[in-house]
Amino acid sequence: MKLLSFVRIFAVLLIVLIGTSLLVDRWISDSTSKQIFTNASQIPSRSIGLVLGTSKYIAKTLNPYYDYRMEAALKLYQREKVNVLLLSGDNAHRSYNEPWTMKRDLLKAGIPDKDIVLDYAGFRTLDSIVRAKNVFEADHFVIITQKFHCERALFIANSNNIDAICLAVPEPRGLAGLKIRVREILARLKAVIDLYILDVQPRFPGPKEPIETVQPVLEGPMPK
């Protein structure tokens, strides 16, 4: 009987967890939908483009998530939608450096060094977004990443009073995409807990390194 009771309690808790996760997932998607764009030519201008880092290679194969983000960052800069690219990612050890890898590829594509800023402490999405405001003093910017990631990144930005929009770049489909989507549901639940219960802050909060830019004319406030 004790085992049966345990199984029932576990089943109820599992159902509650799944239900809560799905509700949070829908809440985050709905609350950020008006801040997401899919066309680089139609997105409002912002002084800074924040590129969220990811590994360039997966098992020695070019990571399409990385490739799409680099293409979009280059396109935004070339169309003068952004003046500076802030590259934020993980620099876990000497042989793994997401920001420098991104910078190297963008330099090869013709973006001048003076218009590239690196954030080596973007270990998580929360770190990248919050540090953009607190360290680099960017309070309005374009985030560049895949749509599912846009939604969570914008949710974090909104929770920190940051005026952000996002250019959603293509993402792989099929089984790989499905696995990442399932992981994203759990990541969103964790984001809510981090923001509203644990008050989690970036692992490295400073020092300040303000980005000097020519401010573009904002094309109206973004609807919330």
Image (spheres, rainbow, N blue to C red):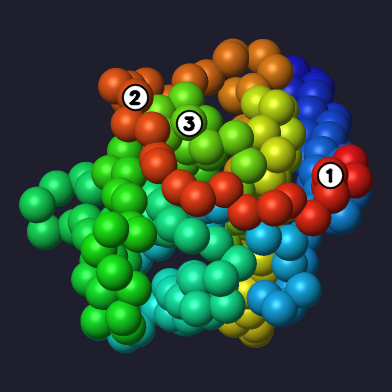
The part of the image, by quadrant, that contains residue 85 is bottom left
Between 25 and 108, the residue placed more toward the observer is 108
Badges 2 and 3: C-beta atoms under 8 Å apart? yes
Q: Amino acid at mark 3?
A: Glu
Residue 65 drawn above or below residue 183? below
**Residue 118 image position (x, y, % from top left):** 30, 49
Q: Residue furthest left?
A: 94
Q: Residue at image x 32%, y 51%?
A: 117
**Looking at the image, which residue sits at the far top?**
198
Of residues 75 and 121, the one nearer the viewer is: 75
- Frontmost residue, 196 versus 48: 48
Amino acid type indicated by mark 1: Pro
The quarter holding residue 188 reads top right
Who comes first in sequence, dot 3 or dot 1?
Answer: 3
Task: Report which residue position mark 3 lands on.
Answer: 137
Q: Which residue is mark 1?
A: 221
Mark 2–mark 3 Cα distance, whole angstroms, equals 8 Å
Residue 72 seen: no
